[in-house]
Image (cartoon, rainbow, N blue to C red):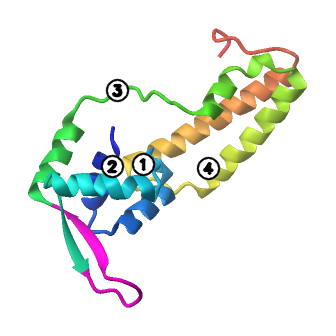
Amino acid sequence: MSLPHVLLGLLGRGPASGWDLGMRLASDPALGWSADLAQVYPALRRLLRGGFVALRRRRSSKGPPRREYRLTAAGRREFREWLAEPLAVPKPHAAPLVRLAFLEKRPPEARLVSLQLYRGLLADELERAASGATAARRRRLLLLEAELAWADAEAAAILAGRTLSVEAR
């Protein structure tokens, strides 16, 4: 996946400024993508040059004119073609996941503390997660619930003085 496709998808919901798109990305973790404004604006310029979006300047009650982007027919077509590509299992690339993968390298007490902290983060995230109006949000809720169950099972195994094997799960 690429940021331009994410932006095309967000613009499919309606015209928006670069700032608005950045805020939508930041506020909806169910999208599975994060980007800061320093990435959003260059991607929008590339989409504009490619004819996938159009730019319209709108007056703003505060500050300079607002640059509002909207999908063009070419942008809708590109987004539909990208959506039609076969799905694949996502390949995570996140330091916290790697630390969890090597959890057994730490002493049991430290593993338990890490799991309890991680469980708290998951519980907070689950509480904040918007309920399932879209498939992406329903997926995120289920993933958070599964991750929470895993953390609980791992903590219980540590407290019982054992480590869960793949076969025991």
In this picture, which residue range is highlighted in magenta?
A: 58-71
Q: Nearer the viewer, mark 2 or mark 4?
A: 2
Which image quarter is the C terminus in? top right
Q: How many marks?
A: 4
Contact, mark 4 vs mark 1 (Cβ under 8 Å)? no
Instruction: Name the residue that disc number 4 marks.
Output: 126
Q: Secondary structure at mark 1?
A: helix
Q: Is residue 112 left or right of residue 147?
A: right
Residue under label 1, please give it: 31
Please say if 8 is above or below 13.
above
The alpha-carbon separation of the residues under discs 3 and 1 comes to 16 Å
Any magenta on residue 63?
Answer: yes
- Where, by quadrant of the figure, is residue 108 drawn? top right
Task: Tell me the kind of residue under disc 2.
Answer: Val
Residue 68 image offset from top left, x and y in percent: 27, 72
Seen from this angle, which residue lies furthest left? 73
Tag of residue 88: 3
- Report the front residue among 20 and 139: 20
Q: Secondary structure at mark 2?
A: helix
Mark 2 sits on what residue?
Answer: 6
Image quarter (top left, top right, bottom left or bottom right) of the N terminus: top left
Give the residue type that dot 3 points to.
Answer: Ala
Please give the name of the residue rendered at 68% of the width and 27% of the height, measured from the top-left corner: 100
SS at mark 4 in the image: helix
- CB atoms of marks 2 and 3 within 8 Å: no
Which of the two discs, 2 and 3, labels the residue nearer the N terminus? 2
Of the image marks 2 and 4, the number of the one nearer the N terminus: 2
Q: Secondary structure at mark 3?
A: loop
**Left or right for 120, reference 51:** right
Query: Dot 1, crowdedness within 10 Å: few (<14), some or many (≥20)?
Result: some
